[in-house]
């Protein structure tokens, strides 16, 4: 299973003020908040954590078909590992000055078999639950601000 999330850092800076009182405590555990407060670039850490939680959520949503996003239930374990209800998820992130793109998987061996596409005109179907698919296989789509990304298995034809 795969999930992904992309954050346009320019849009995030304009649309969200994570420094307002109690914002972090509603989304991040104490350990995650410490990562933010101790970071050289706390903005990037906030949005990296957010993108990781969103990417894992997309896997959990596909597995359970429940659209209940409870950010505190998706937790940072250690570098590139998050958990949700006892299950571990693995992430890889591309962090630039313009965006953060995070891919989450259920097993790290999946990463070499994934492809990232950035053309929002790529056609895809939706399954009976409204989840994106190509050739009967799940894909993950994310967009924010100026950026759009689809993550799929390399062998899927579009």
Image (spheres, rainbow, N blue to C red):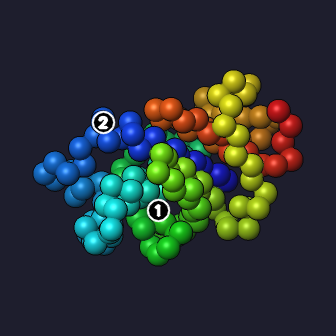
Residue that numbered label 1 is attached to: 84
Across and down, in percent, residue 154 comes to 82, 49
Residue found 30% across the figure and 65% down from its top: 36
Across and down, in percent, residue 10 comes to 39, 39
Residues under labels 2 and 1: Cα distance? 30 Å
- State the SS at label 2: helix
Residue found 69% across the figure and 24% down from its top: 121
Q: Nearer the viewer, residue 154 or 101?
A: 101
Q: Nearer the viewer, residue 58 or 8?
A: 8
Residue found 56% across the figure and 58% down from its top: 93
Name the image quarter holding the C terminus: top right
Mark 2 or 1: in front is 2
Residue that numbered label 2 is attached to: 14
Q: Which is nearer the N-term, disc 2 or disc 1?
A: 2
Residue that lies at the very extreme toward the front in this rendered image: 97
Across and down, in percent, residue 16 comes to 28, 40
Q: Is residue 40 above or below residue 15?
A: below
């Amino acid at each position: 299973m795969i999930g992904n999330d992309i954050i346009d850092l320019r849009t995030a800076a304009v649309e969200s003020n994570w420094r307002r009182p109690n914002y972090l405590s509603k989304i991040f555990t104490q350990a995650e908040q410490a990562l933010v407060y101790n970071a050289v670039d706390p903005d990037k850490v906030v949005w990296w954590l957010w993108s990781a939680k969103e990417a894992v959520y997309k896997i959990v949503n596909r597995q359970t078909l429940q659209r209940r996003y409870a950010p505190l239930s998706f937790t940072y374990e250690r570098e590139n590992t998050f958990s949700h209800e006892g299950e571990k998820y693995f992430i890889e992130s591309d962090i630039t000055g313009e965006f953060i793109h995070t891919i989450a998987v259920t097993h790290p061996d999946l990463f070499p078999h994934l492809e990232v596409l950035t053309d929002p005109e790529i056609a895809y179907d939706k399954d009976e639950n409204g989840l994106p698919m190509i050739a009967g296989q799940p894909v993950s789509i994310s967009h924010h601000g100026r950026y759009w990304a689809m993550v799929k298995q390399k062998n899927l034809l579009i």
